Amino acid sequence: MSGSAAVLPVFEHLNGLAAGLFLLTAFALVAVRQVQACLRIFIVQSVLLAASACIQAYSQEAVHLFILGWITLVTKAVLIPWLLRRTVRREVYVRREIAQVLNIPSSLLIAVALALFAYFIASPLLAVADGPFPRVNLPIGITGLLLGAYAVTVRREAIPQVLGILAMENGAFLAGVAIAPGLPLIAELAAAFDVLIIALVMGLLTRRIHERLGTTVVGEMASLKED
Amino acid sequence: MARNILFNVIQVLVVMALAPLATGILARFKERIQSRRGPSVFQPYRDIWKLFHKDEVVPEQSSWIFRATPYVVFVAPIFVALLIPVLTRYPLFFAFMGDMLGGGFVLALAGFFSTLAAVDSGNPYGPMGASRTRMVGFLAEPVFMIVFFTVSFIAGSTIPYIVHKHWVTPLSNFIAPSHVLLMIAFVMLILAETGRLPVDNPSGHFELAMIDESKSLEYSGRGAALMKWGSCMRFFVLCCIFLNVLVTPWGLTAGETTEAVLLAVPLVLAKVIGFVVVIAVIESSVAKLRLFRITEFLGAALVTSLAAMITRFLES
Amino acid sequence: MELFAILALPALAAGLALVPARRALAAASTVLASVAVLVLAIRVALATAGGRPVVAVASWIACDGLGALVLLLIAFVAVTSSIFSWGYLSRIVDAGKGPKLRRYYSHFNLFLLSMLAVPILAQVALVWIAVELTTLLSVFLVGFEGTAAALEAAWKYVVLTCMGAAIALIGILLLFWGMTTAGGGPFSWSNLVAAAPRMSPALLKTAFLFVLVGFGAKVGLVPLHGWLPDAHSQAPSPVCALLSGVETTTVLYVILRLLPVLQAGESASTWLVAFGLVSVGAAAFLLLQVRDYKRLFAFSTIEHMGIIMVAAGLGGPAAQASAAWQMLSHALAKSFCFFAAGAVLLAVGTRDIASVRGLMRNSPVAGIALLVAGLAISGAPPFAVFLSELSIFRAGIAGDHLAAVGLLALFVVIAFCGVMQQVNRMVFGMPPSTTAVPLPRSCVASLAMAAVPMLALGLYVPPALERLLGLAGTALGR
């Protein structure tokens, strides 16, 4: 259980740093214009998630958090980008501008509002928190979740939507590392595997859409309606 | 007390003397990164000296604003230099004359005057550049405010010396997330306010694309010298605010003797040069932003500073 | 023991389906595997109804009353659906495309496996993974036909459902956190219910809301239902039967399992009733404007999920038992509806309601099937859905929730009118042309098989089943 032993301030600060930069990448996911940049930001976000897990593992001497950190690093920072690049044709990535519903400054303002909303959701829960890690990871994890969801709604392209969903899972994991470190290892392994399958399935589906429709601007697929 | 006044005067003289050097080093280093030789680091001194010895030509239709602006632009950073920690860690004689908001307003006053002078000059490119500068300025103001608010809230005061003591002196604070995020936001702000890439190209000559440079297009002789020196000092003062108040107290002296204060001069200069190198690297790595993308750049700075504020509140 | 076998059989069938052999091998192995699973599921249900919950690995793989009911439903619809697939796919997949057919069956079996895992797994975190897998393994089934519309439906399906799953993940992690601070122990359903009184109410409420919103997107709660009519109409009909009939029920099972965890019963049940009524109402009104008869049935699914939620939210043993009954009758009736829709599609070749007329004369089997399907799903006697809806109304009136019951009855009547109007237009009248396409025998057999319990349970409920429903009901409340 977290919090039973005193946590050294340097670990607290390092974890806070990783979480703060994670928050920044969550905002950046909404603000960039190119598909390649989205992918790079996702990789950075996953590395920060793994770093937070490893810092907490080191300070609490929890071995399975270490394992989770390394698994996260390998699956999300290495395997998933490789999968996404392999399953979808290269020309999708070379696109310079992503079609969006709102322009970027308005998106950033809404993103800030969502971050504050996440903070308000999380603050009554923090009353039960013992230890410094849940206090930082839980609100930022929920923010990552909400910003990922917002990125999915506002982008009209396939790959940024996939990355938005994976970013939502990143946010949930960031919160989970601090509040649920004792989750059985099988569950954590299965969850990591599951994220890989998400990337695989969505990548293959994007490829089929690209082959069939010639474009991956999924926001334009709106033929199924009542009229 | 006499000593405090003396140190304050030394502080201002140091800012006046070393500001062109910082700009010179920045230009030289940027050229070096791009595999060119670049001008000598003392070139800005030579330029200012040359300009002081030239005749001044003033547009006929311009008013007193045009003539007064170089003096305002020259004096404003000096005034701000009285307020901020440049050489010492403890407050000097004029330290309580104004706080960070006051310093911000004084710098904004200089910007206001130079904008008006650009419109006053009658040059068609002047108002164009002036309106663009205003756009950048009004988007940068919220970032300034949020940065200052965050640091002042923690320190309980808006005086730079007190903020500096609470914010950076505990060394473990350096890797705190709010600290890192504020540093990133403020660097973006410095790039925008001093007209560096990616916001504006300081070495460009194409008037249609100028944002900051166009404000001093019409000046010549002594006016141009004062404008140039003033903008160098503005850059130096913003660097000092960033480095000494927000980043680290290294180099500032806690001693009360004149020797200690004079010893701090090369240390602070080394710190500024280090930062100047970082800015040169940033400038050489990015392309200039399209005009309306600047709003996104400053929006990103705003969001970063808000994220810093949020994480600060989460920690406490 | 049976539980392990239930999980192993579809995996085996999926592997067999990939073997490049005669087309019949994949189909036959699927049917055999699902029949075997049904037999095992009946055994588990009987054991549970007799009062002995089946436990294979304590706190990891176990099955109680509600789980056994859901297991039974999945198994039954799996059997009818795999029989229907045999004939249906032989019509829609051309003779040369063997690999496509085999891919269908392997995906089918894997999808089945993931659905079967949900009621069997007692570890809550693994249940989340199983629910996520049901989405991922059915994406290619939804987009099977490869048309632009099918791919669009598959994309919306996977995006909205994965978003919901991520939101539900945080809810489950919050529950785990609450449990560890309240005393720890393995993270199983029963442990969670036992530890609930010691957890902070704010935490429980927030976690429940996250799970409700997240998995509610998968169940088809309005306003997160946008993907459901598309996905459940573009998929091939046997897959639609599985998706509409049992998959939504399975995910709703996960949400309803959390009901007893919420202690202050009041707020959770009010939310469920409110959300449920909004879903039923919206679905009833949206039903009136559809142009595609598969979308008609898909909206009906949304409506029935709302009815189950309202019933579970009303509280009390009678309402809870009738919620379980509604799950049962809906699964049976909805799968029959989609088989009927598939038969109609094979007979006339179009999904558009306006171009289908006079089915009774054209293709009598399809016409009768569609008529029966429409009557069954909108709650006409003597079908099972009528009895279960009646018992919900009775329980609601007895518990004094007159406003909720009144609204529910109104919406059900509106939906009845909507469905029957479209069905009547399609079934009666003069057909545009008299080409009668005979249906494959397996489709007809499957239709008959699916119709029997639907009709029989509307007339007589065997005592074992009644005990099972009662037990299932107790798992829904305190």
Image (spheres, rainbow, N blue to C red):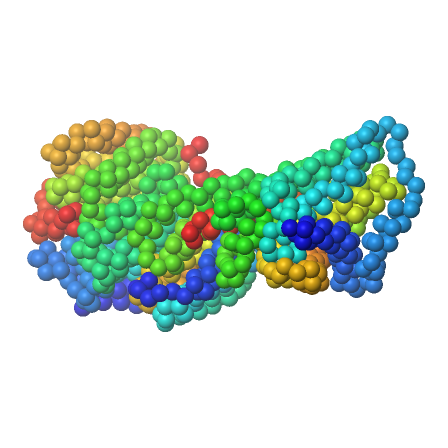
- Total residue callouts: 0
- Quick check: C105 left or right of B6? left
Tell me, yes or no, if residue C385 can be seen here.
Answer: no
Quadrant in the picture for residue B124: top right
The residue that appears at 41% across and 55% down in the rendered structure is A136
Is B40 above or below relative to B77?
below
- Quick check: C359 left or right of B24? left
The residue that appears at 31% across and 46% down in the rendered structure is C206
Looking at the picture, how far across and down is residue B85, in whole percent? 63, 52
The residue that appears at 26% across and 44% down in the rendered structure is C334
Quadrant in the picture for residue A120: top left
Quadrant in the picture for residue B36: bottom right
Residue farthest toward the front in the current orientation of the protein? B2
Looking at the picture, how far across and down is residue C248, in whole percent? 29, 48
Looking at the picture, how far across and down is residue B158, in whole percent? 55, 45
Nearer to me, A94 or B107: B107
Nearer to me, C357 or B201: B201
The residue that appears at 71% across and 35% down in the rendered structure is B112
Nearer to me, C158 or A20: A20
Nearer to me, A192 or C141: A192
Tell me, yes or no, if residue B98 can be seen here.
Answer: yes
Looking at the picture, how far across and down is residue A84, in whole percent? 52, 60
